[in-house]
Amino acid sequence: MKLINYKEVQLEDVDVEGAKGTKIRWLISQKEKAPNFAMRMFELEPGGHTPYHTHSWEHEVFCLEGEGLFVSEWGERSFKVWDVIYVDPNTDHQFKNNGESILRFLCIIPHDKPVKKVVNPFASGRANNC
């Protein structure tokens, strides 16, 4: 179990080619023995962006603060506070801050090698069927 204020989690630079003005906090990860997913918080400075990239896993994104552009194979779409974005696996994508303040969003991804739990405490049946 983990209960902590997000500000207590280290804010790290995203130091990969194509990223600009982007930082990340690994809020929940395999380090905490989370069996299936990682929750990350991204913070993009005005004018900042993630690299335009693709990978084999999905993203589930929730915007907490600011406004941005979601760039994908299908063009650019604006998003703002409280908007939700689902990114399919194998989809080229990028997040850009086109606002005047910090863009902050949660991004949930599956682990490379998840450890499946058998029981879902919030529903009957197996965890994968919730």
Image: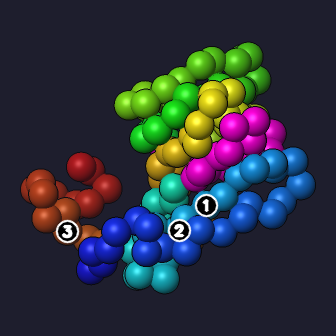
Q: Quadrant of residue 81?
A: top left
Residue at 26% over, 60% down = 127
Helix, strand, or loop for circle 3? loop
Residue 38 included in the magenta stretch of the image: no
**Residue 129 placement (x, y as % from top left):** 26, 50
Q: Residues within 10 Å of mark 1 (few under 14, many from 20)?
A: many
Q: Earlier in the sequence, mark 3 or mark 1?
A: 1
Q: Residues within 10 Å of mark 3 (few under 14, many from 20)?
A: some
The residue closer to the viewer here, 102 or 59, is 102
Q: From what the image shows, is residue 23 above or below residue 118?
A: above
Residue wearing tag 2:
26
User: Which image quarter is the N terminus in?
Assistant: bottom left
In front: label 3 or label 2: 2
Q: Give the amino acid type for the residue marked by disc 1 in the picture.
A: Ile
Q: What residue range appears in magenta?
A: 42-60
Q: Marks 1 and 2: in contact by CB < 8 Å?
A: yes
Left/right placement of residue 103 relative to residue 47 reads: left
Q: Give the amino acid type for the residue marked by disc 2 in the picture.
A: Trp
Helix, strand, or loop for circle 1? strand
Does any portion of residue 24 appear in the rendered image?
A: yes
Left/right placement of residue 65 relative to residue 74 reads: left
Q: Residue furthest front?
A: 100
Residue wearing tag 3:
119
Q: Give the amino acid type for the residue marked by disc 3 in the picture.
A: Val
Does any portion of residue 36 appear in the rendered image?
A: no
Residues at marks 3 and 1, CA–CA distance in whole angstroms: 31 Å
Q: Quadrant of residue 14?
A: bottom right
Q: Earlier in the sequence, mark 3 or mark 2?
A: 2
Residue wearing tag 1:
24
